[in-house]
Image (tube, rainbow, N blue to C red):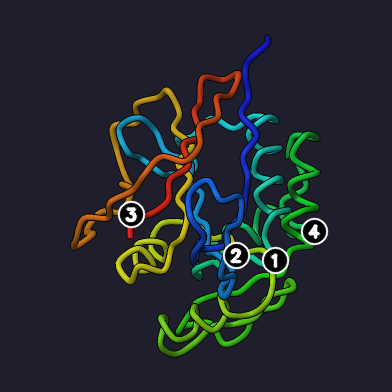
Amino acid sequence: VRRRRRRWGWGWCRRRGGSEGSGHRRYSCFMRPLRYSINVTLDGCCDHRAIPADEELHRHAIENIGKADALLFGRVTYEMMEAAFRPPAGMAGRPEWTEPFARAIDAAKKYVVSSTLDRVDWNAELVRGDLVTAVRRLKQEPGTGLLTGGVKLPLALAELGLIDEYEFVVHPRLAGHGPALFAGLSKYVELRLVGRLEFVSGAVAMRYEPRR
């Protein structure tokens, strides 16, 4: 099956000046971006058990991990990923094509936002205290970006205006149940489409940036 695929850029510098058509643009690269990626059904369900997984989607997830300096998880997502992909846990019965993803997430640096966990390992570090202060501190460190996933933590991050890029991988399926994406969001978050990618399965990844 042949499909057209758009190559996405991952620049994050903000334009500071320079006239249109001058050929010279100045940028301020003072923060690494926080990107969010989530799989979701057409009716808004983001329960991973309702999402069909395949090798192509896992390759895309590996690409996202490879473009980040670290992963930012809440407790639930961290524990779910650890149970599924930390060696040797979760290895039995897993399709062979998931192994590259398992290796990528196993090796990635992780930050875990939790007030209930006493400690984490698996190349991870606990993030405590005020969420705005903690995440801004991480964004101010040098690098190419942070990647987050899950449901509850991204809701809080969206409320605080801390997410710089949203990717929704929309699957052609109706689930009829939750959890729903961004349920309880208290305000509108205006977005603009900056990229689109179609998969053989019929899933479509749409990438957005906030209008600020």
**SS at circle 1:** loop
In the depicted view, which residue is nearer to us: 9 or 24? 24
- Contact? badges 2 and 1 (CB < 8 Å): yes
**SS at circle 2:** strand
Nearer to us: label 4 or label 3:
3
Residue hosting label 2: 146
**SS at circle 4:** loop
Residue hosting label 4: 87
Callout 2 amino acid? Leu
Distance (Cα) linking label 4 and label 3: 41 Å
For label 4, the crowd category at 10 Å Cα-Cα, with few meaning under 14, some 14 to 19 and many 20 or more, is few
Above or below, comparing residue 190 to residue 97 in the picture: below
Callout 3 amino acid? Arg
Residue hosting label 1: 69
Distance (Cα) linking label 2 and label 1: 6 Å
Label 2 vs 1, first from the N-terminus: 1
Nearer to us: label 3 or label 1:
3
Label 1 vs 4, first from the N-terminus: 1
- Residue 102 position, x and y percent, is 75, 50
Above or below, comparing residue 134 to residue 49 in the picture: below
Distance (Cα) linking label 2 and label 3: 20 Å
Image quadrant holding the C terminus, namely bottom left
